Amino acid sequence: MRIVLVGPPGAGKGTQAVRLAEKLGVPHISTGDLFRANISRQTDLGKLAKSYMDAGNLVPDEVTIAMAKDRMEQPDAENGFLLDGFPRNVSQAEALDELLRTEGITLDAVLDLEVPEDEVVKRIAGRRICRNDSSHVFHVTYSPPKQEGVCDVCGGELYQRDDDSEETVRKRLEVYHTQTEPIIDYYKAQGLVVTISSLGPVDEITRRALEALKREKAEK
């Protein structure tokens, strides 16, 4: 299957993308991974992207699209892929459509992970990271440390990242509503959107997503 995964920050896209890609037997293609891979390999696209990033500018759509095109042309993506973080706006969605048309293939579904805005704020603003090791992550509500402000693993100080503050989260949501959310209507017009709730245990959300995608495929 060829799937685009969308949803607001805090919807659990990263977690679900990895799980769904594994279950479906297709590669998980994320914008962040594309940038890191191209930059680390020092490809022409990676060098170009880095020049924009080093200057504090956004990487232009055409560079992101070229990276996505190159990745989707790899052998492991021949029978499908799951796109996470791309397309990020309607112009990228239009470019993706054009790219797929030239290859004679189409998307099977756009999976929309729906979560209330207050829950997004609660999820992200409640995160606490260990200063000694950023892989040690806790949550004041869902997975609190045994001792407030102290990492269970190494005893390091737990802190809230600046971009996890409620004010910053709400700004990120504004950007999502303005730039990314319109692609849902764009794909709805093509009959591709499958919306599921992203509330509940991780395993339950994965099961819900797989069932929705199975139904979508059966109806086509």
Image (cartoon, rainbow, N blue to C red):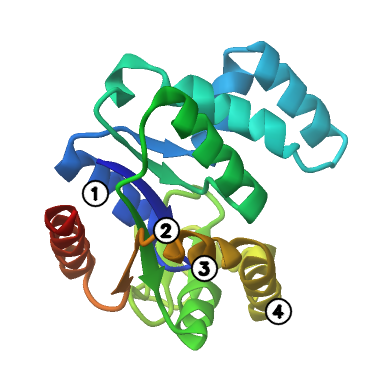
Estimate the x, y position of residue 36 in percent, counting from the top left: 57, 29
Position of 81 with respect to 184 (left or right) is left
What is the distance, in whole Å, between disc 2 and disc 3 at their CAs? 9 Å
What is the distance, in whole Å, between disc 4 and disc 3 at their CAs? 27 Å
Name the one closer to the observer, 133 or 88.
Answer: 88
Name the one closer to the observer, 151 or 185.
Answer: 185
Estimate the x, y position of residue 152 in percent, counting from the top left: 35, 63
Kindly check if marks 4 and 1 are in contact, taking CB atoms under 8 A apart as contact: no
The residue singled out by tag 2 in the image is 190
Amino acid bearing label 1: Leu
Position of 77 with respect to 52 (left or right) is left
Callout 1: SS: helix
Residue plotted at (59% across, 52% down)? 88
Estimate the x, y position of residue 96 in percent, counting from the top left: 53, 39
The residue singled out by tag 3 in the image is 185
Choose the circle earlier in sequence order: 2 or 3.
Answer: 3
Tell me: residue 44, above or below residue 27: above
What is the distance, in whole Å, between disc 4 and disc 1 at their CAs? 31 Å
The residue singled out by tag 1 in the image is 20
Q: Which mark is residue 167?
A: 4
Amino acid bearing label 2: Gln
Position of 200 with respect to 57 (left or right) is left
Q: Nearer the viewer, mark 1 or mark 2?
A: 2
Kindly check if marks 4 and 3 are in contact, taking CB atoms under 8 A apart as contact: no
Tell me: residue 40, above or below residue 27: above
- Visible residue check, residue 32: no
Choose the circle earlier in sequence order: 4 or 3.
Answer: 4
At label 2, counting other C-alpha atoms closer than 10 Å, the crowd grade (few under 14, some 14-19, many 20 or more) is: few
- Visible residue check, residue 167: yes
